[in-house]
Image (cartoon, helix red, strand yellow):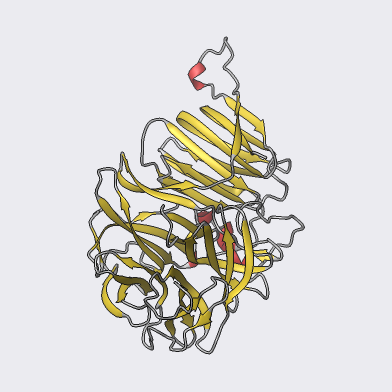
Amino acid sequence: MSTKTDRDFRPFMHFTPKYGWINDPNGLTYENGTWHLFAQYNPDEPVWGPMHWLHATSTDLLHWTEHGVALAPDSLGMIFSGSAVIDHGNTSGLGRDGDPMVLIYTSHGEHEQQSIAFSDDRFHFTPYAGNPVIPNTEKRNFRDPKVFRNPIRNCWTMVLAAGDRAEFYASQDLIHWTKTGDFGSKENHLNGVFECTDLFPLPSPDGSEVWVLLASMALHPEFGGGRMQYFLGRFDGDTFIQDEPHSPYILDSGYDNYAAVTFFGAEKRIMIGWGSSPGYAPFAPTGDFCCLMTYARELSLVQTDSGLRLASKPITPSFELTEIVRETAPENLRFPHKYVPKASGSLPGELFCIHVEADEAFDLMLSNETGEELHVLISDEQKLVVDRTRAGLRNFSPFYESGVCSVTSAPRTNYGKISLDLYFDRMFAEIFTDNGTVLNSSMVFPEKPYQTATLTGHGKMWIGCPQR
């Protein structure tokens, strides 16, 4: 099922392929001022197909240069998701001139197995002749290796999605791997299949170190097709141990931030996700490309009224904010507390941000001349609610059109004053509130660009246009 349209939905600032399909971000690596992004890629048509790795680079995480195919299917199968490292000291022995970049990925053929490829120039990659480095003939779901330096054992550690759990492996050379533990078969609350796991430490507000395990969960389409969750705990060098009894927590209340992982080699913990959902992405009405990457987001841990939470701060273009003055209540209104003032302003195109500050519940609406409306609310029940029921094209996918995907919500983590930021880029809305601990990423397809922002409620609104 697909809906044809002449509307150009290609975002201005989010990475999309020039042509074809992308999904999971892979091999995120930072080195000497350059951010390397790889992604699952079908170069032949804008639908999921024979998976390659596409390569792009940036110096600011906003403007990207596409470099074409880095890895293509071979005798072991398609090139599924994975990660990349800079092999300082050439522990693998694969570098011919200094420290090689090593890609670690899943070879998806008759079985899912882990393989590696290497490069001295960061742009041309040679698969290792001894692949696979972790063979497998038994497990159906055994993929998405994320590799990092293990500070406890002074080795390489891999966290791998293996069915209903994450598995951990250790290596001194990126070639020979030994299993050291697993986690998640009892702790997983979503009852899906683990995908695209990631593990990293962050400082908590009290000065202690907390390890965060990210896990994308493949779910049945009736539940939206996939959600991300995170666990808080510690890493003993062999496996992850959950210390926070109330985790896991849902990372994003929207359905369009999946398979998100973080960069190797960056001073700060920076994450990028796939800005779509496996439940409906193949049917999106976007023409000669399909899918996008989210804005990069800097991660931290913050203490909230609800406990310790992972916070996301988006890396966005610079916007110049203008306050939109709301209506005032008439002096002769008998019950002024029942009067709900409104603020309404014109939008500066299809790339903008909106900032809202409020003491009470409110409804922020983006609308156009055809009557399409995207609603972002803080409800009376203290929830972030995003309603795209009338936001634009919907009938391209029954899953996208379904109630579970049309209206999403998440409870706030802080109570009291509300500060909310919405970043919009043609077809993609990213919403952050409660210091970035409550967020929503949502694709929308308005048939005409949104023209007006209207805030209903006792709050203030600023509209931002991109600075030139």
Q: Residue at x 64, y 38 (%)?
A: 467
| Location of residue 161 with respect to 210 vertically, above or below | below
Counting from the top left corner in percent of width and height, residue 368 is at 70, 41
| Location of residue 336 with respect to 270 vertically, above or below | above
Q: Nearer the viewer, residue 59 or 79?
A: 59
Residue 199 sits in quarter: bottom left
Question: How many marks on residues?
Answer: 0
| Identity of the residue furthest to the right in this view | 6
Residue 122 relative to residue 347: left or right: left
Which image quarter holds the C terminus? top right
Counting from the top left corner in percent of width and height, residue 293 is at 56, 59
Residue 261 relative to residue 324: left or right: left
Q: Is residue 277 visible?
A: no
Which image quarter holds the N terminus? bottom right
Q: Is residue 387 visible?
A: yes
Counting from the top left corner in percent of width and height, residue 69 is at 61, 74
Q: Residue at x 47, y 51 (%)?
A: 297
